[in-house]
Image: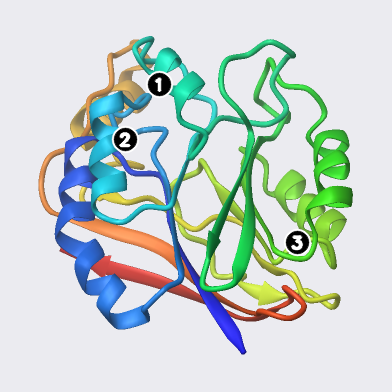
Amino acid sequence: MSYTILFLGDVMGRPGRNAIKQGVPSLLESYQPDFLIINGENAAGGVGITPEIANEFFAIGADVITLGNHAFNKREIIPYLKQNSRIIRPVNMPEGTPGVGVTTVTKNDVTLTVVNACGRVFMEGYNDPFAAMKAVRDEAQPHLFLDFHGEATSEKVAMGWFMDGFATAVVGTHTHIQTADEKILPEGTAYITDVGMSGPQNGVIGMDREIVLGKFLTSIPARFEVAEGPGVLHGVVVRASKQTGRAESIERIRFAT
């Protein structure tokens, strides 16, 4: 017997939210996932998330919302994080940070532990993610899903190997570009370096391309804005054994809306 996890990468602004609303019902019908997890850290104007947006994601079927380095960009999310354990910020933040970094969801005879962690390479303010995940992995077997939000490919790959045999899946987020290295590691952990972004198709990692090009061409600082236009969903579908929690398959998905 197996179960299925559908994970959708960083939702980017209004185009990403619209893509979620339009595309998720079809994906749920196609894949029949037991669990739906959405990274929502860029959902509000490209940085952060609000309680209203989080409620929208839960209303369309999300079981857990993960965040990342923009978890607290919208200050109104802080009370919400304190009250709702199904939206999680990075587990390796300083002690006393509002919210939680680990949550569990039980459906169809499977209790899935979901964790959010941030890398430290090119990203400041986080405790050691490997130490944080060692503490989690020793208690959370056999069904453990990690959204590792990081900049550096090497750090994400290292985390995959560190968690092999302890996690059902380790999926990378943050860089917004879907990588083609999905695999099942030797001890049964599904891995991908980055699942990609759910947001506007025609920007630069979700931002207005003319503004971004202007900065590259002139080196003049600019305030980035989320691109307009049609959206696309990127993510992965992971299937795993109910008995062991080991991954059986991982599939990249791209769904244009």
Return the x and y of residue 114 as percentages of the image width and height: 61, 50
Mark 1 residue element: helix
Task: Looking at the picture, tell me which residue is in the foreground, 250 or 215.
Answer: 250
Q: Which residue is mark 2?
A: 54
Of badges 3 and 1, the one in the foreground is 1
The residue type indicated by label 2 comes to: Ala
Cβ atoms at labels 1 and 2 below 8 Å apart: yes
Q: Which residue is mark 3?
A: 167
Quarter of the image for the N terminus: give it. Answer: bottom right
The residue type indicated by label 3 comes to: Ala
Task: Looking at the picture, tell me which residue is in the foreground, 180 or 248.
Answer: 248
Q: Residue at x 40, y 21 (%)?
A: 80
Give the CA separation, mark 3 to mark 1.
28 Å
Query: Does the image show residue 201?
Result: no
Q: Residues within 10 Å of mark 2 (few under 14, many from 20)?
A: many
Q: Earlier in the sequence, mark 3 or mark 1?
A: 1
Give the CA separation, mark 1 to mark 2.
9 Å
Return the x and y of residue 140 as percentages of the image width and height: 78, 53
Mark 3 residue element: loop
Return the x and y of residue 94 as percentages of the image width and height: 73, 14
Position of residue 21 relative to residue 67, above or below, is below
Give the CA separation, mark 2 to mark 3.
26 Å
Q: Residue at x 25, y 63 (%)?
A: 24
Left or right, 42 with respect to 100, comes to left
Q: Which residue is mark 1?
A: 80
